[in-house]
Amino acid sequence: MLSEAMLACSGAIGRMGRIADGSTVSDYHASEKQRQISTQASLLHTNWAGKKFNIIDSPGYLDFAGEALSALRVADLALVVIHARDGVGVGTERVWKYATELGLPKIVVVNLLDKVASAGDFDERLAALREHFGANLIPLSLPVNPGAGFNQVLDVMRSTVVTYDISDGRGKFREEPAEGALKETVARLHRELIEHIAESDDALLTKFFDQGGLSEEEFRAGIHDAVQKQHLIPLFCTAAETGAGVARLMDFIAKYGPSPLDHDRRPALDANDGPVEVRLADDAPVAFVFKTMAEEHFGELSFFRVYSGLVRSATELFNADRQASERLGQIYILNGRERTPVPELRGGDIGAVVKLKDTHTGNTLGSSSKPVRLPKVQYPLPTIHAALVATVKGEEDKVAAGLAALHEEDPTFLHRVDSELHQTVISAQGELHLEVVIDRLRRRFNVHVELGEPRIPFRETIAAPADSRYRHKKQTGGAGQFAEVWMKIEPLPRDSGVDFTESLSGQNVDRVFVPSVEEGVQNACREGIIAGYKVVDVKIDFYDGKMHPVDSKDIAFQIAGYFAFKEAFQKARPCLLEPIHQVEVRIPEDCLGKVMGDISSRRGRILGVDAEGPFQTVKALVPARELYRYSSTLRALTAGRGIHSEAFDHYQEMPRDMEQKVIEEAKKKKAEASVK
């Protein structure tokens, strides 16, 4: 709604849309209208006070954090919007962290001040924000009458009370000098602001002490640099639905906010992977594609930022990542779904182009004579996995093409065909992200798919040594088959794999048959013995046997090796290993007990708990079997305020009772498959 209000205040749109009606400019996709939340970053633009604003409205929901990260990658300023009533969430934390890592200046906007109960609520919120983000968070506006009918803001920069006309959402206002207690408040904040500005620059600090302060001209001249260096993080108060506070926020951005000139040198790599700089003043065009998406009736749309030179419609550029030429079609600037064709874009600007042949998210376009590659975005790892099940035969190729296209558009969505488990496994940032991606797959590619639980890649091993002597003999009237294999096996340490050796002596078995026996053993290891899972951490010694001068051959020793190994394995106290994942959960402090209890109920082992402000980070080892859709459970336990990451750590032996369940399930599936 804040981006909608900015468009309305500047006259870019005739009237404000509403989320409930699905009529906002930026949330125009089917999934966004259906769920009434943003699921994709939208590109907007407007003009204010003689400056062009390129606005990327990115989703706040954690499942779509990749969209926010892509937007921050090409932004000059992070406008971090905080709910006046709910305060800092885990999503806010993540965006703040991304922006800080990218070195972006930040402005905090506390929105929905027409929804709070009293001024005391805002005071508590401000204190919590300053405790969380630091003392350099300085309010440049304060709500005079928060709650229903909120329309007055105390302007710290101008020492005035700004009264907004909230009847039409246009953000019109009038100003009056602050009086009484408000005058004292604004004077105190004004002094605090001047001190922060002085501390951001040595020359200004010297003047501050020499003169006992800064002149208004010196003070205002220092604001831009202080914001740029993050010595000052301005805070503004708004109620976007009515437009209150929005115009003064835009005034500040236009006058003091960062521009492309403040980031006029970008690190990059040349054709030989050597470090170079892309400068805004360079003549050679350089553009970075930060998002791709398919639009109905429009084709694939690529969002890009120009970092140097001019990028013109109907020209050819070189894709340094793909080592291929790419011809650009018509270039557009966007306001949501509205496209305005333009002949060219210059350094610092953002636009879109349709139907690029071989260019995807994260690629750099430029000159073939001086190719460069800008750094790619490092996206978060998925937190939820599911098996994709096709319900109609013959659609496999369409499903594969659809999954590949969706990954190119959204790199936080991953998919793989697991040859071991015979499943297509898809991975996403959360359950809602998974649902949105599958909806797109069904709608755009007209396929019939469902989601199921992914199989767990258990492993089989042994706990004791054993041996076997297996004879394979087959007579069919002609040439027969004969092979006898004597074999010893013993357990190996974890992660040792399968070690096949031979210690034959004498002439009982010709050494030419050793590879045949090994092939039979490896086939048995791939198939599994007790539950159909890969065998690991076993040493096999083929130490003797017998052969026939006529009937012994390669296939006979393969079969004998296969069954000799299976026979020995069954005697060696076979057991199942399960994958254990390292899980890191970040939650508000008041949820700690519930989350730790839930982890324990999943057979998890807590490794430690670290405190960071109002948040706690729990580290634990949890069996992968217990983590299916854990992100959904975590959000239910934390009212949507918890996030987690998980990564494979090691394999360990399963409890016997659970092992037996897995073995019984495997036998049942095998029996069902044989009937079919």
Image (spheres, rainbow, N blue to C red):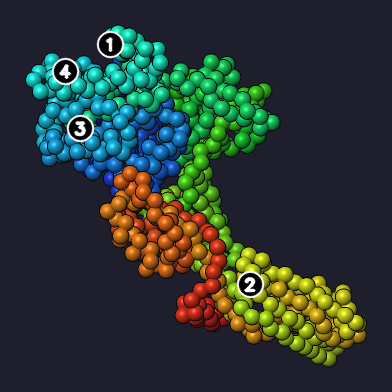
The mark that comes first in sequence, 1 or 3, is 1
- What amino acid does circle 1 point to? Gly
User: Which residue occupies 59% across, 66% down?
Assistant: 420
**Residue under label 3:** 239
Q: Residues within 10 Å of mark 2 (few under 14, many from 20)?
A: many
Name the quadrant of the C terminus.
bottom right
User: Which residue occupies 58% across, 70% down?
Assistant: 459
Q: Are marks 1 and 2 in contact (CB under 8 Å)?
A: no
Question: Of the residues tagged 2 and 3, which is closer to the observer?
Answer: 2
Name the quadrant of the N terminus.
top left
User: Which residue occupies 49% across, 43% down?
Assistant: 379
Question: Of the residues tagged 4 and 3, which is closer to the observer?
Answer: 4
Q: Residues within 10 Å of mark 3 (few under 14, many from 20)?
A: many
Relative to 376, is 231 above or below? Answer: above
**Residue under label 2:** 535
The mark that comes first in sequence, 2 or 3, is 3
Q: Quadrant of residue 514?
A: bottom right
**Residue 190 in the figure: left or right of residue 496:** left
Disc assigned to residue 19: none
Relative to 444, is 501 above or below? Answer: below
User: Which residue occupies 42% across, 61% down?
Assistant: 606
Q: Quadrant of residue 469?
A: bottom right
SS at mark 4? strand
The mark that comes first in sequence, 4 or 1, is 4
The mark that comes first in sequence, 4 or 3, is 4
Q: Position of residue 474 (x, y in %)?
A: 79, 89
**Residue under label 4:** 160
Question: Of the residues tagged 2 and 4, which is closer to the observer?
Answer: 4
How far is the residue under mark 4 from the one under mark 1?
24 Å
**Residue 548 in the figure: left or right of residue 196:** right
- What amino acid does circle 3 point to? Ala
Q: Residues within 10 Å of mark 4 (few under 14, many from 20)?
A: many
